[in-house]
Amino acid sequence: MTSGDQVLPVSEAHEAELRALPVAEPPRGLRLLADPTFRRLWLGQTISELGDGMTGLALVVLVNRLAGTMSAIALLTILTSLPQIVLGLHAGVLVDRWDRRRMMIACDVARAVLVGAIVFLQDPRQIAWIYGLAIAQAAASVFFEPARTAFLPAVVGAPALLAANSFGQTTRIVCATAGAALAGFLLSLPNGMRLVFALDALSFAVSALALSSIRVAARAAPPVDPEVEAPRSGVTAELMQGLRLLFGNRTLVGLLMIFAITLLGMGAVTVLFVPFMLRDLGASTIAIGFVRTAQTVGMLAGGALLAGPAARLTPTQVLTLGIAGIGPCLALMGLAPHWMALLPLLALIGVCSSAIQTGSVTLIQHAVPDHARGRAESTLDTLLVAVMLVAMAGAGGLGDRWGARAVFIAAGVLAVVAGFVGRAWLSPRANGALRRA
């Protein structure tokens, strides 16, 4: 075994549990809601995410209304991405040391107050305060998300994790779409802007109440390695602790390699997609809406498949199939003669994206011991956000030099390479060879 594996090995129990997944009988689809604990967690998150969908659009509209420039909106996007970079490693450490349910409740209460405060900020002279509140809300989410990922295995059994994660992913997609649509209607009403932020604040309060009604042991399990959990202080020490945790676990290293390779291309695609549609394909903004809708439909279809017929697949199979499928779709997008040719491609990308998200989260939950799941999630997210920002920063230059079509084809090739890497690195045969080494 490698020296890193001695720091944080994947226990034999976790590996046996993972291998047993294909023969286990997982709860399918809506049967998960029969569990009152999962139902409370899901209901609270559904209402909260619906509010998030409304605020996501309303915040951009508000900044555009008050500042009137695209640079102001770009600044909002950059600033709200920074908390993950700055706080991600610290968040994971705290998630693994504190009661996760109470942390989620505290985050929801904080976000309710922060979003509620925006109700009273509607003047151009207050835009700095709006930025500050948006950053603070994003910071609270940095703590909430790894806590939720680490908490879910305490709510549902191991065979149900893939279906539960898929169910949650599908719910988030529906809520984001419905929330944005609802916000579009509410913003047309008198005082609609204030109403949207007030409703989002209320949604966080409802989520906190739902979490408070759950009675599940939510504190991380006692550490199995005193060296890993020894008290630490200082940014450098916590950074090294999170990195040792990540690079000492073969599954996490595999996920880092897969997503780093994929995001080098996807980051550029994200930036160039709208210019590609408008300039290269001559599409209208309405056409962009149709294409985005096709992707959303694909993500919903992917979630339905993973919560139902595909629930017997292992998380590794789900992840690698998703990565392998997204590569050819990206490359074909670069060859598309008309925007309508993107509709089936974006639908397939939606299916693959759902598989990638669900498979990766389930892998982390199975392959990492309970006391380290928070750090695993947040450390991986922090590094990948950094990769994504680098890719997005270089997208403009690549697009100007090569053209958007060439960038899309290159992104597809990178995704295919990532699929092969994932298949080789995460295969049971490779893991067995590592254990015998």
Image (tube, grey):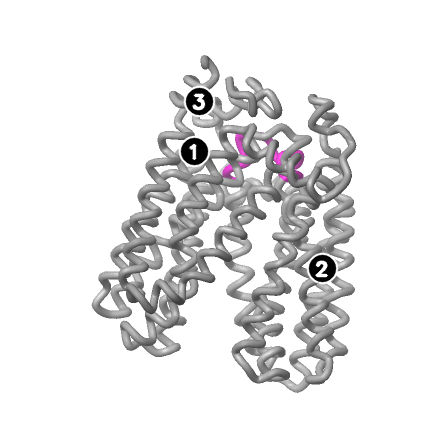
Q: Amino acid at mark 1?
A: Thr
Q: Quadrant of the C terminus?
A: top left
SS type, badge 2? helix
Task: Say which residue appears at 24% left-offset and 70% top-offset.
Answer: 338
**Image: 400 above or below 165:** below
Residue that numbered label 2 is attached to: 204
Task: Say which residue appears at 55% left-offset and 60% top-offset.
Answer: 175
C-alpha gap between disc 3 and disc 1: 12 Å
SS type, badge 1? helix
The answer to whether residue 346 is magenta is no
Residue that numbered label 3 is attached to: 431
Residue that numbered label 1 is attached to: 316
Bounds of the magenta span?
Answer: 150-163
Q: Residues within 10 Å of mark 1 (few under 14, many from 20)?
A: many
Q: Is residue 256 visible in the rendered structure shown here?
A: yes
Q: Residues within 10 Å of mark 3 (few under 14, many from 20)?
A: some
Q: Quadrant of residue 102?
A: top right
Q: Position of residue 131 (x, y in %)?
A: 68, 71
Q: Residues within 10 Å of mark 2 (few under 14, many from 20)?
A: many
Q: Position of residue 411 (x, y in %)?
A: 34, 53
Task: Say which residue appears at 53% left-offset and 71% top-offset.
Answer: 181
Instruction: Decide whether the magenta segment is chiefly helix, strand or loop.
Output: helix
C-alpha gap between disc 1 and disc 2: 33 Å
Q: Quadrant of residue 119?
A: bottom right
Q: Quadrant of residue 312?
A: top left
Q: Is residue 135 left or right of residue 412?
A: right
Task: Say which residue appears at 47% left-offset and 23% top-offset.
Answer: 19
